[in-house]
């Protein structure tokens, strides 16, 4: 054991000695236009958004420093400036501070966003570039991201003699990146434009015969696409990149990725690249993929794989590390940083310290070289359909929840009481639960259902509950608004087009007994739904900090018009809701009056709230903590 520790220490000392800082990290931000591409269609040539804007953040080596080190906020505020400049119908002023609060709250280290914004970097603005030739590395940002998300790696590379150009993730006008191939290709085209521009201007003296690329998350897919189109790239480091994808969780995302793969944009079997894939450890937690597209396995060239067992996707950005969110996050990112640098030193500079570092890294108990094995999983193999009626009246029951108990697979009946539910073979021994407000729930063994080929007919029996006696005194009532009152236009969460039955909410503390509920309020900052939608308000009692049973006796339905935004107030006085204990209040999407398209979604404001947001993906799934920030739901009460 002592010998092993000694070897690790020697390796680390050797690494630090060989990679001692040689240069200072400079940063230049360039605001450019690509006149070969139209950004906003149907505009005049003189319109400021007619041509594609391309902003480049370039970290580079310098022999001298001047001025003070930049704070993280100096780099982060570029995101706000570009969010404002890249479109002309939304004002994103102030988003820097809200996003900083969001990151801090999500990591569970308080609510003060200044803690993040004030972090000092080792980057200096606009230093004189080193006159030497230096290898060039492209950084392809994650989904709607920028270089700030991994600035620690980028500045470390520049301190060791690399020019790093960060390509931020911007789709077609108005700039939002999506999973569609056309938007992904915009980031690829931006990277190609950056290369052409730097070759033409040559003010950084980059070595264009010595190019590497880093891709984080969605940027991994655009990196692989770029490599297939630009054969001069020698090395590729992927931070949990989407060039490898596990299918089966999100139908829309899966479809878009199938289109990209089918178009042969990546073609790993034909790529001659040195490749390092660093993967997160929780990617398949509580998720059973049906199949995979594995870039690492398909690649035939020199390649390395490592999975950090206890890591999450967020650990592949530097933000948890610079905030010291946990010892694990700091350690993981230190390993990512050192491994990335040593890999490029080996592949672009012929300095092989990577081999000894890799040898020790792959033997750690917290890492594995074994890629995920999904061979035991199966695909969707059947579906069931049915009609649910009232047992006494035989009338169809709308908005009934149907789903596999404790799995993220479910739906709701339409206004005619009908439903269709896709199933997997491995759910044969599970239980189907059918539940509706005001009716007794029914559990049905899936094994029995599979034997039936006809449409299921399920009858629900009305549940008669004794009403608790409420004594109303003559004293004056005190009015309060309880819950999360945010109406943020920047930080939001919501439902995508195909999530009928999904539900989210927050815990609301009840201070007095009894408390009378007058109204439910929430705010919609963005709404891309083109059809009228119906949502249901639910109130749950609480067990072990999770929703247990819906305490309402009637459906409280909230219609939302197409594209409707702003504050929504639901009058709850007719429902005589009286609370005596803390509750969880949720909003559930139960119906649409028409078909929703793939790019449609609705969003609700989020803000700081210690209890966070609870979410379940479908009917009968388990509620899970979705975010440390709370969705902006609140209730007007009297007590």
Image (cartoon, rainbow, N blue to C red):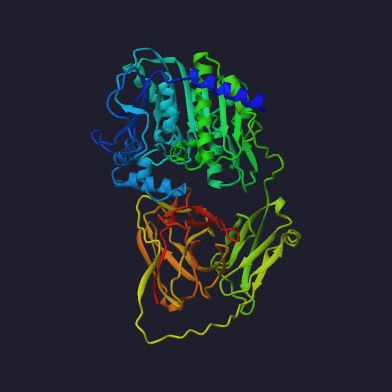
Image quadrant for the C terminus? bottom left
**Would residue 143 be found to the left or right of residue 68 on screen?**
right
Q: Quadrant of the N terminus?
A: top right
Of 74 and 497, which appears nearest the observer?
Answer: 74
Residue located at (62% from left, 72% from top):
389
- Considering only vertical position in the picture, is 482 above or below 298? below
Left or right of 81, for residue 286: right
Q: Position of residue 63 (x, y in %)?
A: 34, 17
Residue under the image location 54 percent in, 82 percent down: 467
Q: Residue shown at 65%/46% (left/top)?
A: 288
Q: How many marks?
A: 0
Most distant residue in the front direction: 2
* Left or right of 16 in this view: 71: left
Residue 278's quadrant in the figure? top right
| Image location of residue 22, percent across then percent down | 41, 18
The residue sitting at the left extreme is 46
The residue shown at (39%, 58%) is 562
Q: Position of residue 241 (x, y in %)?
A: 53, 34
Visible residue check, residue 231 = no
| Residue at the bottom extreme of this rendering | 474
In this view, 140 is above or below 383: above
* Depth order, front residue of 481/441: 481
Residue 593: tell me if it is visible.
yes
Residue 548 drawn at (x, y percent): 58, 66
Which residue is at the front of the view, 553 or 487?
A: 487
């Amino acid at each position: 054991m002592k010998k092993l520790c000694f070897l690790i220490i020697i390796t680390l000392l050797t690494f630090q000695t060989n990679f001692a800082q040689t240069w200072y990290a400079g940063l230049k931000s360039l605001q450019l236009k690509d006149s070969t591409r139209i950004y906003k269609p149907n505009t005049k040539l003189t319109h400021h958004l007619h041509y594609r804007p391309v902003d480049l953040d370039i970290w580079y080596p310098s022999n001298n420093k001047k001025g003070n080190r930049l704070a993280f906020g100096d780099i982060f505020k570029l995101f706000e400036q570009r969010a404002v400049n890249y479109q002309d119908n939304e004002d994103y002023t102030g988003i820097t501070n809200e996003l900083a609060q969001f990151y801090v709250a999500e990591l569970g280290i308080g609510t003060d966003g200044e803690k993040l914004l004030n972090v000092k970097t080792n980057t200096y603005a606009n230093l004189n570039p080193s006159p030497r030739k230096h290898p060039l590395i492209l950084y392809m940002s994650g989904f709607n991201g920028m270089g700030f998300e991994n600035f620690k790696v980028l500045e470390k590379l520049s301190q060791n003699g690399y020019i790093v150009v960060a390509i931020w993730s911007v789709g077609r006008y108005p700039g939002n990146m999506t999973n569609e191939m056309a938007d992904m290709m915009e980031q690829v085209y931006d990277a190609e434009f950056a290369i052409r521009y730097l070759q033409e201007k040559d003010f950084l003296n980059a070595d264009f015969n010595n190019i590497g690329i880093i891709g984080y998350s969605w940027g991994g897919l655009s990196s692989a696409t770029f490599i297939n189109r630009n054969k001069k790239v020698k090395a590729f480091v992927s931070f949990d990149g989407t060039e490898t994808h596990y299918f089966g969780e999100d139908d829309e995302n899966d479809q878009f990725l199938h289109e990209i793969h089918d178009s042969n944009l990546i073609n790993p079997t034909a790529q001659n690249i040195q490749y390092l894939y660093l993967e997160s450890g929780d990617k398949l937690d509580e998720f059973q993929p049906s199949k995979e597209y594995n870039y690492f396995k398909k690649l035939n060239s020199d390649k390395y794989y490592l999975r950090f067992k206890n890591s999450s996707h967020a650990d592949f950005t530097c933000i948890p590390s610079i905030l010291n969110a946990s010892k694990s996050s700091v350690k993981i990112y230190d390993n990512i940083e050192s491994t990335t640098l040593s890999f490029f030193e080996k592949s672009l500079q012929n300095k092989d310290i990577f081999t000894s570092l890799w040898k020790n890294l792959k033997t750690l108990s917290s890492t594995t070289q074994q890629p995920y094995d999904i061979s035991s999983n199966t695909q969707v193999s059947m579906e069931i359909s049915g009609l649910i009626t009232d047992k006494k009246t035989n009338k169809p029951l709308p908005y009934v929840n149907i789903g596999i108990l404790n799995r993220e697979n479910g739906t709701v009946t339409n206004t005619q009481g009908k439903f269709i539910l896709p199933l997997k073979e491995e759910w044969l021994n599970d239980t189907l639960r059918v539940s509706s407000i005001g009716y007794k729930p029914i559990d049905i063994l899936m094994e029995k259902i599979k034997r039936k080929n006809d449409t299921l007919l399920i009858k629900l029996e009305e549940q008669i509950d004794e009403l608790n006696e409420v004594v109303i005194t003559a004293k004056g009532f005190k009015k309060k608004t309880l819950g999360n009152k945010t109406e943020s236009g920047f930080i939001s969460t919501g439902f995508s087009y195909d999530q009928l039955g999904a539900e989210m909410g927050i815990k609301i503390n009840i201070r007095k007994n009894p408390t009378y509920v007058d109204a439910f309020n929430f705010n919609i900052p963005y709404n891309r739904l083109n059809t009228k939608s119906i949502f249901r308000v639910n109130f749950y009692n609480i067990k072990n900090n999770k929703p247990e049973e819906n305490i309402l006796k009637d459906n409280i339905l909230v219609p939302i018009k197409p594209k409707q935004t702003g504050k929504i107030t639901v009058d709850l006085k007719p429902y005589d809701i009286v609370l005596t204990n803390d509750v969880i209040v949720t909003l559930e999407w139960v119906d649409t009056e028409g078909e929703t398209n793939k790019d449609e979604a609705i969003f609700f404001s989020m803000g700081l709230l210690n209890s966070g947001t609870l979410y379940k993906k479908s009917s009968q799934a388990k509620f899970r903590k979705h975010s440390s920030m709370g969705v902006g739901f609140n209730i007007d009460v009297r007590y």
